[in-house]
């Protein structure tokens, strides 16, 4: 099998640089992976495009939660697509659904038109559609470059059968990129079942904050919050280990 393209999902400059050092071919740049990835800040995107030599796919997602957006949210997404073009990103990543659980064809078409000539990925909003095969055909018809999916299951391992069927039905018309729960421990099994052209994974290691003084009474999040003085940072060695475990 030919070596697939490895895309790594990151939510910070340091993690993006680590992904590159570890051998990633491309990053999906987000903010707030606790929410599944949101639109990154302008400064983050700007510095990333200045310092990375690999491709950068910019997440376009104005909030967490579902993928059925208001008019104001959609307007913000359209502006962020233009920002991605202006700052030099390789492409954009988004997903928009109707209340009925179908791909929002018209809004997706509008964002694609704004994004070109950048590459377009339809993200795991796909996994929330009511009919994955109809959704796949809608994306093919729109000219989307790739779709990111875990096979409508919590992880790629659980969704292997559906992903394999999607790859077969796509027949080269769109890239079906598995992503969700791929690690150095399971990527070889996944790749044996899915000889795909592109794979997507994430990973982080808790690193202690450099803060010496720590106020234990104040927190920046809500009741459910990550530890205030540890950072979840991708390590180059982990990226290299996942790629190596794939036999690539």
Image (tube, rainbow, N blue to C red):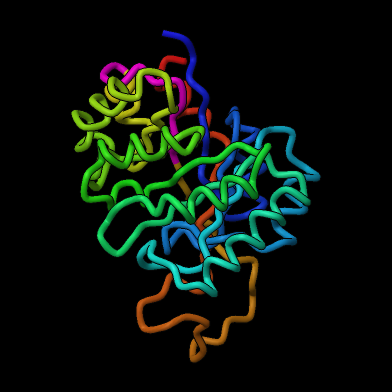
* Spot occupied by residue 161 in the image (x, y as percentages of width and height): 19, 28
From the viewer's perspective, is residue 126 above or below residue 97? above
Left or right: residue 56 versus residue 181 is right
Left or right: residue 93 versus residue 52 is left
Viewer-proximal residue, 94 or 131?
131
From the viewer's perspective, is residue 11 above or below residue 187? below
Most distant residue in the right direction:
50
* Spot occupied by residue 58 in the image (x, y as percentages of width and height): 61, 49
From the viewer's perspective, is residue 195 above or below residue 233? above
Q: Is residue 245 magenta?
A: no
* Spot occupied by residue 150 in the image (x, y as percentages of width and height): 30, 40
Residue shown at the point (57%, 52%) measured from the top left = 111
Left or right: residue 124 versus residue 6 is left
Residue shown at the point (62%, 41%) measured from the top left = 91
Residue shown at the point (58%, 62%) measured from the top left = 77
Q: Quadrant of the N terminus?
A: top left
Please give the range of residues in magenta.
Answer: 192-201
Q: Quadrant of residue 182?
A: top left
* Spot occupied by residue 140 in the image (x, y as percentages of width and height): 42, 33
Q: How many marks overall?
A: 0
Residue shown at the point (27%, 39%) measured from the top left = 134
Most distant residue in the bottom direction:
217
Q: Quadrant of residue 69?
A: bottom left
From the viewer's perspective, is residue 239 above or below residue 180? above
Left or right: residue 134 versus residue 70 is left
């Amino acid at each position: 099998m030919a070596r697939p393209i490895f895309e790594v999902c990151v939510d910070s400059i340091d993690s993006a640089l680590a992904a590159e050092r570890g051998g990633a071919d491309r990053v999906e740049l987000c903010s707030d992976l606790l929410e599944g990835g949101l639109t990154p800040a302008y400064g983050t995107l700007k510095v990333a495009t200045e310092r990375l030599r690999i491709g950068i796919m910019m997440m376009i997602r104005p909030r967490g939660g579902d993928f059925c957006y208001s008019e104001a949210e959609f307007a913000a997404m359209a502006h962020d697509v233009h920002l991605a073009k202006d700052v030099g990103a390789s492409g954009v990543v988004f997903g928009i659904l109707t209340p009925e659980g179908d791909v929002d064809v018209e809004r997706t078409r509008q964002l694609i038109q704004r994004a070109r000539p950048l590459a377009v990925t339809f993200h795991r909003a796909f996994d929330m559609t009511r009919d994955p095969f109809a959704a796949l055909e809608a994306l093919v018809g729109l000219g989307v470059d790739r779709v990111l999916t875990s096979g409508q299951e919590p992880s790629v391992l659980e969704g292997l059968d559906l992903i394999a069927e999607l790859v077969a039905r796509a027949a080269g018309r769109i890239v079906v990129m598995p992503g969700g729960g791929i690690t150095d421990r399971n990527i070889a099994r996944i790749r044996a079942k899915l000889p795909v052209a592109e794979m997507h994974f994430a990973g982080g290691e808790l690193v202690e904050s450099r803060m010496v003084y720590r106020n234990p009474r104040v927190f920046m999040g809500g009741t459910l919050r990550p530890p205030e003085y540890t950072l979840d940072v991708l390590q180059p060695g982990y990226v290299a280990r996942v790629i190596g475990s794939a036999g690539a």
